[in-house]
Image (cartoon, rainbow, N blue to C red):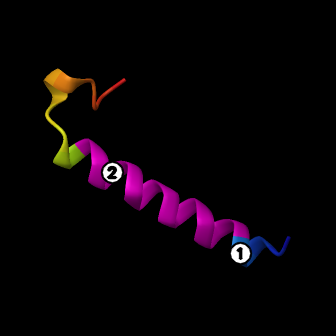
Amino acid sequence: MPKKVLTDIDVKGKKVLVGVVFNVPIEQGAVV
């Protein structure tokens, strides 16, 4: 798999994780 594709997936994954962490209260276990 090309590095560009891996980087795109990695960046999108991090954005999704960050969005989930900021959208879900810490009390519900957003931060592990």
Please name the residue that numbered disc 2 is placed on.
18
Residue 4 vs residue 16: left or right?
right
Where's residue 16, x and y in %? 39, 57
Q: Which mark is residue 5?
A: 1
Residue 1 vs residue 6: left or right?
right
Where's residue 17, x and y in %? 39, 49
- Which of 7/23 is in front? 23
- Residue at the spot 29% in from the left edge and 48% down from the top edge: 20
- Residue at the spot 59% in from the left edge and 60% down from the top edge: 10
- Residue at the spot 52% in from the left edge and 64% down from the top edge: 11
Q: Is residue 17 magenta?
A: yes
* Amino acid at dot 2: Val
* Amino acid at dot 1: Val
Magenta-drawn segment? 6-21
Where's residue 30, x and y in %? 28, 32
Q: Is residue 28 magenta?
A: no
- Identify the main secondary structure in magenta: helix
Where's residue 28, x and y in %? 20, 25
Q: Which mark is residue 14?
A: none
Residue 8 vs residue 19: left or right?
right
Q: Indicate the quadrant where residue 9 lies.
A: bottom right
Local SS, label 2: helix
